[in-house]
Image (tube, grey):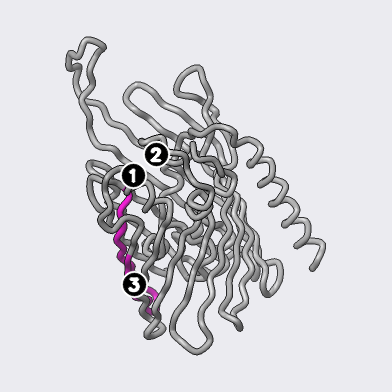
């Protein structure tokens, strides 16, 4: 391993450790940053950080995946999240020399219009609420197998008369072996803090330490993906539990896993399914066991055009549907 690779890995692990020490509270803000931006990733359970796809939307989940994306690719995504809430994202990736890649992106979550009431319950009118993030970053292919990337974020939320601004960064490292159809990644996402708080108290961003692998079978058109997320949170207070039952250690451990499988009958088509243990646990606790934790999707990869559709459930009110379209200019 070269000195350049060692330096990047040490830097990433150091930042991860610092982020882990900072996460001593059970609540965070700007949690929309943890929503999937790729319909393929969503179909595989939510956040799969090691997918070696030509998918520009994935760089919003792991900037080290930028080198896998075709030059001058633009990706647009739309997510019907839950009742009254809609999310959209856009990303663009272009090559920078033989080993570098630049990427930009945007994420938006709108909550629709709501009634504004005073303390006595008198209606004052309507107000809107939204979350937004603008991103820009760079990735570099260190060797034939290793790539590292960083993505800076400007995050903004406005709820009626209240607003907040934060600055954050995602750091990622990816190992890709094309010959063995194997990919592995580590990501430190949402490192940063508020520049302007909603009130007098500053709140934490949803720092997320993620690791994942993706492996295609040698003699079958099947690929498995496994990611572990929220690796700095090992207490039951981080999970929705209205009954206040004591969470078992094994259940807390499994709540970090996101599992996915792709069936690839031909090179231009995928059919995907996934299971998110935490989503299943929390939806069941909220009284919704129908398809809890399960997700499905499919996509077509043409020469320049790529499309994907997926289904999952993130809230008891309604299922979530997501669509992505990518075009290489």
Check residue 82 in the rendering and tell me which mark sits there, or answer none.
none
Number of disc labels: 3
Q: Is residue 70 visible?
A: no
Tag 2: Cα neighbours inside 10 Å, few (<14), some, or many (≥20)? some
The quadrant the N terminus occupies is bottom right
Q: Kindly indicate whether the residue at mark 2 contacts the one at mark 1 (C-beta within 8 angstroms).
A: yes
Residue 215, horizontal then vertical, whole percent = 54, 75
Q: How far, Cα to Cα, is label 3 from label 2?
A: 35 Å
In the picture, residue 304 is in which quadrant? bottom left
Residue closest to the far bottom: 219
Tag 1: Cα neighbours inside 10 Å, few (<14), some, or many (≥20)? some
Q: Is residue 179 visible?
A: yes
Camera-nearest label, 3 or 2: 2
Check residue 241 in the rendering and tell me which mark sits there, or answer none.
2
Residue shown at 40% from the left, 54% from the top: 90
Q: How far, Cα to Cα, is label 3 from label 1?
A: 32 Å
Image height check: is 295 above or below 152? below
Residue 276, horizontal then vertical, whole percent = 41, 57
Residue 238 is a magenta residue: no
Check residue 285 in the rendering and tell me which mark sits there, or answer none.
1
Residue 80, horizontal then vertical, whole percent = 27, 51
Q: Report the side of 285 relative to 41 (left or right).
A: left
Q: Earlier in the sequence, mark 1 or mark 2?
A: 2
Label 2, secondary structure: give it.
Answer: loop
Q: Which residue is tagged 3?
A: 299
* Region rendered in magenta: 296-314
């Amino acid at each position: 391993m070269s000195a350049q690779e060692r330096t990047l890995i040490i830097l990433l692990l150091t930042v991860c450790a610092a982020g882990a020490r900072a996460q001593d509270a059970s609540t965070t803000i700007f949690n929309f940053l943890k929503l999937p931006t790729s319909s393929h990733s969503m179909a595989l359970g939510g956040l799969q950080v090691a997918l070696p796809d030509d998918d520009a939307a994935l760089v919003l989940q792991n900037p080290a995946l930028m080198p896998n994306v075709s030059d001058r690719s633009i990706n647009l995504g739309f997510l019907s999240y839950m009742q009254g809430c809609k999310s959209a994202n856009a990303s663009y990736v272009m090559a920078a020399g033989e080993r570098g890649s630049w990427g930009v992106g945007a994420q938006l979550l709108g909550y629709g219009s709501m009634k504004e009431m005073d303390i006595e319950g008198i209606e004052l009118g309507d107000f809107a609420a939204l979350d937004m993030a603008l991103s820009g970053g760079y990735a570099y292919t260190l060797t034939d197998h290793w790539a590292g990337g960083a993505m800076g974020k400007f995050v903004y939320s406005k709820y009626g008369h209240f607003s907040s601004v934060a600055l954050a960064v995602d750091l990622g490292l990816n190992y890709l072996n094309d010959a063995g159809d194997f990919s592995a990644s580590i990501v430190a996402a949402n490192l940063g803090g508020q520049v302007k708080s909603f009130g007098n108290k500053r709140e934490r961003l949803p720092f997320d330490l993620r690791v994942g692998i993706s492996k295609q079978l040698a003699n079958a058109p099947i690929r498995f993906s496994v990611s572990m997320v929220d690796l700095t949170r090992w207490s039951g207070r981080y999970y929705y539990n209205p009954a206040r039952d004591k969470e078992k250690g094994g259940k807390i451990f499994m709540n970090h896993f996101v599992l996915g499988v792709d069936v690839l009958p031909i090179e231009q088509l995928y059919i995907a399914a996934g299971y998110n243990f935490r989503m299943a646990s929390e939806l069941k606790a909220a009284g919704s066991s129908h398809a809890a934790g399960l997700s499905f999707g499919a996509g077509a990869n043409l020469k320049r055009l790529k499309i994907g559709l997926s289904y999952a459930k993130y809230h008891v009110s309604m299922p979530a549907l997501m669509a992505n379209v990518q075009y290489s200019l």
